[in-house]
Image (cartoon, rainbow, N blue to C red):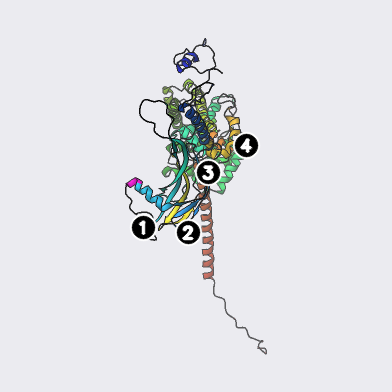
Amino acid sequence: MTAIGSEAALRANSGCGCGGQCAGQARQISLPTASSFVRPRFFTGQLLCAEDLQANVGYVLDTARMRNRLMFGAGVVCGLAVACDPCDGPGVLVAPGYALDCSGHDLMVACAQRVDIVALAREARARVTGTDCDRTPGHAEQGSDLRSYGLYIRYEEELTDPLAPYPAGEPCGTAVCEASRVREGLRFLVRPMPDGCGHPRPRRSPLQRVLDCLGDTTGVAARVRRLRDYAEALAAAADRGIDISLTEDDRRRVSASVGALASRPDAPGRERLEHVRALAAGIVRSDHPEKEFPKELEVLRTAARRLTEEVAGHPLWEDRHRVLLAGALLTQSLATARETGTTTLSEPERRMLAQGLPLTQAVRRTLYADLDRVRVWLRAALETMASTTDCELLDRLLRIRFPEPESKADRSDTHAELGALAAAAVPLVDVWRRHVLACACRLLTPPCAPCEDEDVLLACVEVRDCVVVRVCAADRPLALPGAAWGDLLPLLPRLRAWADEVCCAPDTAPGHGIAPAFREGLFAGAPDDIGDDPVLSGLARALGSPAGGGARASVSELTDRVARLSALVDELDSRLQEERRLFEERVQALEKRPPARKTAKRAGGTGGGS
């Protein structure tokens, strides 16, 4: 067995320690790494002291408790059911069972225990205030004072079985009896629960853990999303070798948008704006739009004009950047649908609009600002991140060549400028993606949970007039295998399958395989919602949960639902108005109709002719 050297020796021989050289000629050695556990080693003829035997016991206890704490966590393992006292008194009955606290201590209740909740509440108050006033539940106002208490169990030790030590010939003093046993036990205690029963500790969803790793993305998420929408489109527009022509998918999209705008002219503005965007993108791809899409041009012109008038005083969003994109889209849509049949768009603008993305002077300034803000945010995040698995990410960011500031004032709109924007936007978006991916893949390495409270909750108990009225054990923590995984444990197989595909996948060059396709969902969702990030969306699909995390829908999903409900309400309201109009017309027609004459019917006939 190789002996472990001193710390100084380890540093000197490690090659990369404080006292060694981190050079190519460093000697390759293999030494055990010192841990926090040291166990005693016995040999024949060794003089054993109390410290040696205590070290042996301590080693066994420490390793066992560490396994309890890290593999199972704190909580109830089995049993320890809490029920009402059959005598309807101030106590409850705790069934036998076993639990673990966050330090790994074993909490064993061997037989059923009757626990007086009111007495424990008085004891807790006396410990806090130093008085034994009788202000326990039920004594303030009889019949109205309902209070909730948490019943906890706590590990305790007691030294027992004292023995006199064997005289060792010590010159000083007389021998004092020492405890020869440690009795492990427990005690019950209560704590007030101001919020009452039925309020378990909030649990963080897997996606929320990723967001916690990313930090505050307020303000930067919308900029990243805009760059993600524009990055590859800028590259496709700048490359004249990429053909942007009309396809069958574009024709179907144009036909669907024309039908939607014609059938629902009063649909919500955001919905009509998306149809206008799809319609303009398809028409501008045609070499002869006035011949190929004459009716479609008229529909586009009418819808764009109406939306321009509507949004002039009532913008569709509060976010100024989305208002800017909407205004640019409507302006370029009207330029595409000019009655003269000739568009005023430049070639780069036309190639961008063909992909569903407007490009004006104001939009260009916004993209330059997005590049700068996202670069600053990413650099600060990567430089202050405690640990990362993508070791070259910061270097990738620093190697990106951003356009010079003087190009912001250039109004040339040349292919070269689009290429410069794309050359910065594409790798910058890739750095963001890899940063989000690094945080997502950290779900596979959960940290060890800290021990902040050694008391284990058994149940929430409601007391009225010194009598227990209800017991709720739904909030108790449970000790489960793989404690560090927590809520991720049932999702672990799906998480591993997702991680196998993306976390260690071969690195590909950003922007590889760029196609001039129509960019879907430019205005979908909330501006600053990060839930539609490709990495987070893929993780959500793999885990079978919405991108907003847990059982909650994301902001974008809620926005889409509200839009659909608003459209449904508008349609129902229009139908109701139409039915009301028809009803009023029928009522007026009935009022104008002369009353019918009443004819007397003779029973049995007239009996003769007249």
Is there a contact, CB below 8 Å, between mark 1 and mark 4? no
**In front of the other: 425 or 291:** 425
**Which numbered disc flags the more N-terminal residue, 4 or 3?**
3
CA–CA distance between discs 2 and 4? 76 Å
In front of the other: 305 or 77: 77
Q: Quadrant of residue 489?
A: top right
Q: Which amino acid does label 4 sit on?
A: Asp
Give the mark nearer the N terminus: 2 vs 1: 2
Mark 2: secondary structure: loop
Element under disc 3: strand
Chain part drawn in magenta: 127-140
Q: Looking at the image, tell me whether mark 3 or mark 1 is earlier in sequence order.
A: 3
Is 90 magenta? The answer is: no
Q: Residues within 10 Å of mark 2 (few under 14, many from 20)?
A: few
Q: Nearer the viewer, mark 4 or mark 3?
A: 3
Per the model, the C-alpha gap separating discs 2 and 3 is: 26 Å
Which residue is tagged 4? Answer: 249
User: Taking 430 as reference, is 189 left or right?
Assistant: left
The residue tagged 3 is 98
Residue 23 point in image, percent of width and height? 50, 11
Mark 4 near mark 3, Cβ–Cβ under 8 Å? no
Q: Nearer the viewer, residue 551 or 530?
A: 551
Q: Where is residue 604 in the image (x, y as percent from the top left)?
A: 66, 87
Q: Which amino acid does label 3 sit on?
A: Tyr
- Write down the residue under mark 1: 139
Q: Do the residues labelled 2 and 4 touch (CB within 8 Å)?
A: no
Element class at badge 1: loop
Mark 1: few, some, or many residues within 10 Å (few <14, many ≥20)? some
